[in-house]
Amino acid sequence: MEDLRIGVIGLGLRLSLAVAAHRPGRGSVVAALCDSDPAALKKAEERFGSPYLTEDHRDLLERDDLDAVLVVTPDDTHERLAVDCLGAGKAVYLEKPMHITVEGCDNILETARRTGTRLYMGHNMRHMGVVRLMREIIQRGDIGDPKTVWVRHFVSYGGDYFFKDWHADRRQTTGLLLQKAAHDLDVIHWLAGGYTSRVNAFGDLMVYGDLPRRAPGVPRPEGWLKEFDWPPAARKDLNPVVDVEDLSVMNMRLDNGVIAAYQQCHFTPDYNRSYTVIGTEGRLENEGGHVKVWNHGPTGYRAEGDITYKVPETKGSHGGSDERIVSEFCGFVREGGVTDTSPVAARMSVAAGYMATMSLRDGGVPYDIPALDPELVAYFDRGQVER
């Protein structure tokens, strides 16, 4: 099998994905790199042999020796880059979230259909062992029909990861209830078997709004992703613009009647992502490396479930999901078909996060999720082929 030749646009925090895609002799090779930072290009070149290098993505798209492109750039650039790549006939891997607006997502989907070019979304949590295990338990019927999902996301590194660079600027993210929550919202939809139809939310910039910021044009300090500040109020060197919320809660009604809730906090001492799914015959929760199921009762509180499943051990970045998602992407580029990561689902997670952010900034007023053209949905449900 000849290696797929892949180009990469963006050499920042998701460089690990490009590393996972560089498997010479085993299916795929990174053959071209693009970044606006010459230093990043030079540094990355050493990891990938001797790829083609450019600071302009249009140069990369003119090459006829590339089969696909990974777009792993800041969120606000996704629409423009994805549309350019699709228009050039290059299969696209687009990192989550799809875009920072509903309109941008819809434009990407419509362009993919119009050009007939394959589009793949990087919702890597669908390939995480814990998520797949929870979904298997639910689909097997161990807790009956799911009726509600609760998610709490404690982001201990939030003040460093999200408030010291472009993530803190709503012009580039809309907000962290979209940017950071896009994964969780997609997982809620996947576990519950439906998409959000109506949301309301509350939140605020409670801690990081008044902390010291860098002057415009001043680069992030060395070691900013390794030398963390604590307590939260001691953090400094924040992004020049900080106007996204560091605390948010949202409520969702899904189109199948399931009600869900999501909470996100960026100033907790520990990092944790906890899911609770309650069905007509029981509930499940993830805890550490296990998923617990309670499906006998009624009783008082019990810390231990009736059944405890161990999450399969994995190796590699993002709990092994990067390697799995690259494998699915490469198979999709070669053969097409339906994939676990769905562009329509990616759009719906953005839409939920976007409208929740609008609600949050409008005093918690409920917002409906804009509908997607049924013909467009059908196109992607068929594996991106016309009738």
Image (cartoon, rainbow, N blue to C red):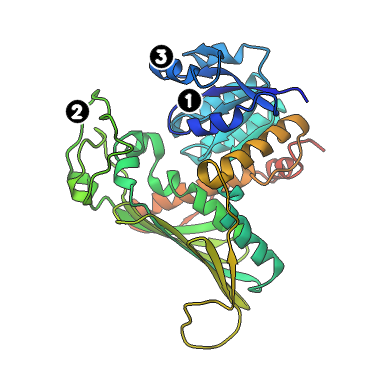
Disc 2 is placed on an element classified as loop
Q: Which residue is mark 3?
A: 38
Instruction: Report the residue marked by disc 2.
Output: 215
| Alpha-carbon span between mark 3 and mark 2 | 23 Å
The answer to which quarter of the image holds residue 60 is: top right
Identity, as a three-letter code, of the amino acid under mark 3: Pro
Q: Helix, strand or loop at disc 1?
A: loop
Tag nearer the camera, 1 or 2? 1
The spot of residue 200 in percent (x, y) is 42, 59
State the image coordinates of residue 19 (x, y, percent, origin top left): 54, 29
Quadrant including the C terminus: top right
Q: Position of residue 368 (x, y in %)?
A: 51, 55
Q: Which residue is situated farthest in the right direction here?
A: 387
Q: For label 2, count other residues whose C-alpha is less than 10 Å away and answer few (under 14), some (14-19) or many (20+).
A: few
Upstream in the sequence, badge 1 or badge 3?
A: 1
Look at the image and tell me whether residue 149 can be seen: yes
Closer to us: 39 or 189: 39
**For mark 1, what is the residue?**
10
Q: How many marks?
A: 3
* Type of the residue with mark 1: Gly
Residue 134 position by quadrant: bottom right
Which residue appears at 47% of the width and 58% of the height?
199
Q: Residues within 10 Å of mark 1 (few under 14, many from 20)?
A: many
Indicate the secondary structure of the residue bearing disc 3: helix
